[in-house]
Amino acid sequence: MNYGIVLFPSKKFQDTANAYRRRYDAHYANIPPHVTLKESFNFDEENLPLITRALRTIAKKHPPVVIDIYKVDTFYPQSTTIFYKIKENETLQSLNDALYTEPFPTEKEHSVFVPHVTIAQGLSKAEHADIIGQLTMTEVSHREEIDRMQLLYQLENGSWTVYETFLLEG
Amino acid sequence: MNYGIVLFPSKKFQDTANAYRRRYDAHYANIPPHVTLKESFNFDEENLPLITRALRTIAKKHPPVVIDIYKVDTFYPQSTTIFYKIKENETLQSLNDALYTEPFPTEKEHSVFVPHVTIAQGLSKAEHADIIGQLTMTEVSHREEIDRMQLLYQLENGSWTVYETFLLEG
């Protein structure tokens, strides 16, 4: 089974992100706007209690996370993904580190953790070139605190269902 | 803010339901396959702690729920919604009752609780007539236990995000 671990920002901010995602994000219908803490990983469903126990421990040790969004950026030329960039901070980095430590799979797809909320992906190079200028010029400034993380699993159609919420109570 | 309270069945059963929902359910992209315990209700976000506290108490008092799906049925002529029907049982009914008791809004849209997983909705009468015969003839027999319920809120685009999971530990 494929699992992922994310933060959902407030409804208000999700609505803002969706205004772009509706048009530009090929995964729009698969998952609400989110901050990925751990990328999709495969794990035996049998061993799920191991994962949920570890998540409970991690959640108890970490305080709520501040999400400070300050600009629109792109991963181009690695990919045509465009995103709201979040200022790095200790809690976010520590959560990310903990989620790449056993019992979780420790392999990283990307060497550096760039906390973000995706607003466009699956674009052609031409589409990306068309919209990146206008999007990066948009002024963005949003700050909020998120006090929970979510463990999700992926259905066969590519969409994600929440399995469990973990309150950040550290 | 609009909230709802649901059970998500297993991934396997969600995949089965989605095979129909993809074609027949106008809300396919808004939420994974689910059993509604409490229909969409409006509640002041400020008072959310009241709701989550109540849900924790209810979850602690109720054991995991058995979901026994035994046929495909329709709400026609009330609506053209087609669904997997779940055998009524005490725990399901008790959860439903508790979620229509204060501090939750107590008004009921439907007088009787018919536990189900929707697989088709938003159909025209003609479409409903076309597919209901074939769907109700499908033999269905599926039984599983669900040990958690989910509080969700609705985004402006109509889709639902999970706010919190409550483990049924009674």
Image (cartoon, coloured by chain):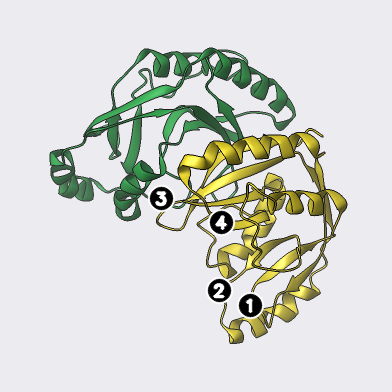
Chain colours: A yellow, B green
- Alpha carbon distance from label 3 to label 2: 21 Å
> Which subunit holds the residue at mark 2?
A
Residue tagged 3: B28
- Alpha carbon distance from label 4 to label 3: 25 Å
Which of A116 and A47 lies nearest the eye of the viewer?
Answer: A47
Point out the image quarter for the N terminus of chain B.
top right
Q: Can you tell which quarter of the image residue B113 is in?
A: top left
Comparing labels 3 and 2, the label whose residue is closer to the camera: 2
> Which subunit holds the residue at mark 4?
A
Q: Can you tell which quarter of the image residue B74 is in?
A: top left
Q: Do labels 2 and 1 share a chain?
A: yes
Residue tagged 1: A80
Residue tagged 2: A122
> Which subunit holds the residue at mark 3?
B
Q: Do labels 4 and 1 share a chain?
A: yes
Residue tagged 4: A41
Q: Is residue A80 visible?
A: yes
- Callout 3 environment at 10 Å: few (<14), some (14 to 19), or many (20+)? many
Residue A139 vs B101, above or below: the answer is below
